Image (cartoon, helix red, strand yellow):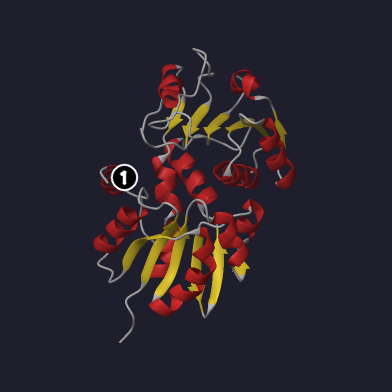
Amino acid sequence: MSKIPLAGVIGCPVGHSRSPVLHGTWLRDYGIKGHYVPLHVEAKDLAAVLHTLPAMGFVGVNVTIPHKEAALALADTATPMARAIGAANTLSFVDGHIHADNTDGYGFMQNLRDGAPAWRAEGMALVLGAGGAARAVIVALADAGVPRIVLSNRTRARAEVLQAEIAAPVSVVDWAEWPQAAADAALVVNTTSLGMAGQPALDMPPALFDPRTVVTDLVYTPLETDLLRQARACGCVAVDGLGMLLHQAVPGFARWFGRRPQVSDALRAAVLGA
């Protein structure tokens, strides 16, 4: 009798993750005998846990903060995307080996294309923030053919480190200058936590955007942030961040459970209600 496949999400903390609801919905909808569970793992225990999970029946795990970089370092093999980003969010256990991938960029691009189907990889893209999500977004945009990416972060030095480490057409501007850059952008992406529930708002001047600009926010709590609200007021196409979470989960689920799932309105509702 074959084992029931197990998967999960590793983080510290991990209780906030909506991935168990997301994957659990797919497992139930497709009638798959499998389980997906949250796993709170301290940094000091990560290596031991990853090497123990396959013997327990785990076929893979998602990885969230603060373990993404360490997970890549512990992997036996990795995709070019994970190597380019410098972090892993999806691990698969195959024949005693740990295979690492990063699907954040894939999730971002799928969400962008769903929400702004007319968008093309032309003109300048402005990316706010210089954390792990920004790395994934920049690599994905460069891979899609965006010719120029402007990066702005509250700490300029961190943005310059990212610029130096990623092979992409990136230039850096001071945080005070990003609104001016936004006026000339074809795409604006907020990867910071500003605007998230419980966090300070993203400080923006009125009438900031050209109506031809596409604006997307990786924050999805609330679903419509002040950034997206102002973008719509300017006549822009505004894309919320929930779809990135949903789409980035697709490749891992397909590898672990043998079926490529669909991102639907019902799935969005289930995850929003979690």
Q: Quadrant of residue 161?
A: top right
In this image, 199 relative to 267: left or right? Answer: right
Furthest residue to the top? 206
Q: Residue at x 43, y 41 (%)?
A: 114
Furthest residue to the right? 164
Q: Residue at x 62, y 23 (%)?
A: 178
Q: Nearer the viewer, residue 112 or 95?
A: 95
Q: Quadrant of the N terminus?
A: bottom left
Residue position for label 1 = 268
Q: Residue at x 48, y 41 (%)?
A: 113
Furthest residue to the front? 44
State whether residue 147 appears in this view: no
Q: Nearer the viewer, residue 167 or 162?
A: 162
Question: x and y percent of residue 72 in the render?
Answer: 59, 61
Question: x and y percent of residue 233 in the render?
Answer: 42, 17
Instruction: Tell me the kind of residue under disc 1.
Output: Arg
Q: Is residue 174 above or below residue 10?
A: above
Question: x and y percent of residue 18 in the render?
Answer: 35, 50
